[in-house]
């Protein structure tokens, strides 16, 4: 193995370690963003199931507020390759609706979707810190 190949492997390994640290930092910041409590009230569904609902409407363009804490608890991340990672917020309603995605991504046919983004604004807010952790430029956050 040539010296150039050893240096290239070393740089790739360091970038992966930096990305790993950055994803952990980002998940912690996303959890902080989702930790703003909403005033809530207890509601009973038609089926007799008790749950909580926000007592006041959410502020437009603000991150979703915490009602049960399920979104905050479900925020996680993982490395998907040596130089790629993903942040996931996987909470679902009891009926199976993926409300974290509803808040973050504007989707045709879903009125109100994308109005309470929380991941992309958190990336923007901490872009400088993330760049310092990774040690390289971070591409703009884009959604599928």
Image (spheres, rainbow, N blue to C red):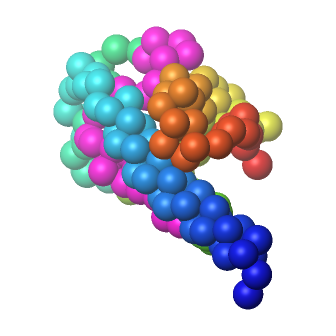
Q: Residue furthest right?
A: 108
Camera-nearest residue between 2 and 89? 2
Residue for point 25% across, 51% down: 49
Residue for point 51% across, 53% down: 18
Q: Residue furthest bottom?
A: 1
In the rendered image, residue 52 lying in the magenta stretch gets the answer: no
Q: Which quadrant is the N terminus positioned in?
A: bottom right
Q: How many marks overall? A: 0
Answer yes or no: is residue 84 visible. yes
Residue for point 55% across, 46% down: 134
Q: Position of residue 103 (x, y in %)?
A: 56, 34
Residue for point 42% across, 38% down: 30
Q: Position of residue 28 (x, y in %)?
A: 35, 42
Q: Position of residue 38 (x, y in %)?
A: 28, 22
Camera-nearest residue between 12 and 104? 12
In the rendered image, residue 63 lying in the magenta stretch gets the answer: yes
- Asked whether, in this view, residue 108 is left or right of residue 47, the answer is right
Q: In this picture, is 77 found above or below 9?
A: above
Range of residues picked out in magenta: 58-79
Camera-nearest residue between 123 and 128? 128
Q: Position of residue 55 (x, y in %)?
A: 29, 19
Quadrant of residue 105 within the rendered picture: top right
- Asked whether, in this view, residue 92 is left or right of residue 68, the answer is right
- Asked whether, in this view, residue 116 is left or right of residue 81, the answer is left
Quadrant of residue 39 within the rendered picture: top left
């Amino acid at each position: 193995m040539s010296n150039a190949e050893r240096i290239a492997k070393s740089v790739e390994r360091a970038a992966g370690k930096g990305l790993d640290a950055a994803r952990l930092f980002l998940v912690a910041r996303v959890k902080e963003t989702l930790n703003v409590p909403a005033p809530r009230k207890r509601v009973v569904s038609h089926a007799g199931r008790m749950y909580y609902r926000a007592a006041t409407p959410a502020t437009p363009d603000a991150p979703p507020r915490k009602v049960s804490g399920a979104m905050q608890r479900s925020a996680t991340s993982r490395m998907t390759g040596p130089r790629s990672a993903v942040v996931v917020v996987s909470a679902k309603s009891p009926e199976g609706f993926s409300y974290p995605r509803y808040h973050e991504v504007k989707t045709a046919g879903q009125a109100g979707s994308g109005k309470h983004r929380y991941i992309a604004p958190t990336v923007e807010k901490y872009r400088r810190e993330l760049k310092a952790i990774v040690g390289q430029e971070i591409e703009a956050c884009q959604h599928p």
